[in-house]
C-alpha cells in the first residue's frame, strides 16, 4: 500500500497545473484570459500599456482540440507562466454572437469576424502586431497564426518567437527553423 501511495504522489507531482474550467458559453477558461468589451483597438492599447502582446484565441464549444490545449498543453507550467507574463489574451467564440469591433472600425459578431478573418479551424491563435495601422483588420494585422492543437514545446516556441519579434528579424530563421533549432537545443540539454 505504501508503494502505491508513493507512486500516486510521484504521478501527481509530475502532472501539470490544474486544467481550465469551462464557462457558460462552453469554452474553456484560463486565468490569463481577459474579459473585455471586444473593441480590438482598445484591447491593443491596454496590452501595449501593460507591456504585453495582444493575442486572439478563436475557439468553439465541443472542440476536441481546444479541450486538448486547455487540459494538456496550456496547464504546463512553463507555457502557462510565459503566456500569463507576456500576453494579453482575448478569447472569441467561432460561433458567438458577442459584438467585436475590428481594428478597421467594423462592428460585427464573433462568428462574422471569424469568417471575415478566414478562420477555419479551432483553436486558432492570432498573434497581433503591437502597432496596427488604421483601416487594417485583425487578420491583416497578425504577425503569426497558430491554427490547431500543438504540443506544449511547439506552443511555447511559437509564443516565444512572437514575443521576441523573431518574425521581424532580418534572418533566414523563420518559425520552422527556429522551432527545429529549439528542439535540438532541448535534446542536447537532456543528454
Image (spheres, rainbow, N blue to C red):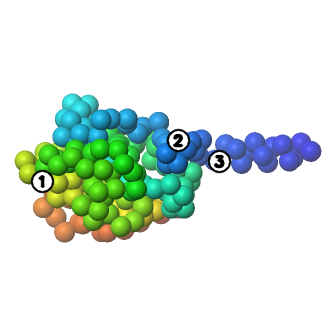
Judging from the image, what secondary structure is the residue with disc 2 in?
loop
Vertical arrangement, residue 64 with respect to residue 40, above or below: below
Question: Residue placed at 51% from the left, 60% from the top?
Answer: 63
Residue 52 in the figure: left or right of residue 137: right
Question: Residue placed at 47% from the left, 36% from the top?
Answer: 31
Residue that badge 2 annotates: 24
Residue that badge 1 annotates: 136
Q: Earlier in the sequence, mark 2 or mark 1?
A: 2
Mark 3 residue crowding within 10 angstroms, few (<14) / some (14–19) / many (20+)? few
Screen quadrant of the N terminus: top right
How far apart, in angstroms, are the residues tagged by discs 1 and 3?
Answer: 44 Å
How far apart, in angstroms, are the residues tagged by discs 2 and 1?
Answer: 32 Å
Residue that badge 3 annotates: 14
Judging from the image, what secondary structure is the residue with disc 1 in?
loop
Asked whether residue 155 appears in the rendered view, the answer is: no
Find out whether the residues at labels 1 and 3 contact each other: C-beta distance under 8 Å: no
Residue 162 in the figure: left or right of residue 14: left
Residue 99 place in picture, x, y as percent: 29, 44
Judging from the image, what secondary structure is the residue with disc 3 in?
helix
Residue 46 place in picture, x, y as percent: 24, 33
Camera-side residue of 79 and 187: 79
Mark 1 residue crowding within 10 angstroms, few (<14) / some (14–19) / many (20+)? some
Q: In this view, which residue lies farthest toward the right?
A: 1
Question: Residue placed at 12% from the left, 53% from the top?
Answer: 136
Amino acid at each position: 500500500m505504501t508503494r502505491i501511495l508513493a507512486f500516486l504522489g510521484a504521478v501527481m507531482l509530475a502532472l501539470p497545473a490544474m486544467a481550465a474550467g469551462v464557462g457558460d458559453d462552453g469554452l474553456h477558461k484560463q486565468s490569463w484570459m481577459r474579459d473585455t468589451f471586444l473593441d480590438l483597438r482598445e484591447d491593443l492599447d491596454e496590452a501595449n500599456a501593460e507591456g504585453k502582446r495582444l493575442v486572439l484565441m478563436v475557439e468553439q464549444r465541443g472542440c476536441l482540440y481546444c479541450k486538448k490545449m486547455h487540459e494538456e498543453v496550456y496547464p504546463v507550467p512553463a507555457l502557462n507562466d510565459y503566456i500569463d507574463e507576456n500576453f494579453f489574451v482575448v478569447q472569441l467564440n467561432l460561433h458567438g454572437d458577442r459584438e467585436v469591433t475590428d481594428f478597421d472600425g467594423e462592428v460585427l459578431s464573433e462568428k462574422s469576424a471569424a469568417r471575415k478573418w478566414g478562420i477555419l479551424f479551432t483553436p486558432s491563435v492570432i498573434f497581433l502586431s503591437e502597432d496596427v495601422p488604421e483601416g487594417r483588420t485583425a487578420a491583416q494585422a497578425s504577425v503569426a497564426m497558430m491554427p490547431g492543437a500543438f504540443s506544449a514545446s511547439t506552443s511555447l516556441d511559437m509564443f516565444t518567437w512572437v514575443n521576441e519579434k523573431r518574425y521581424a528579424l532580418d534572418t533566414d530563421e523563420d518559425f520552422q527553423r527556429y522551432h527545429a533549432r529549439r528542439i535540438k537545443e532541448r535534446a542536447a540539454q537532456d543528454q
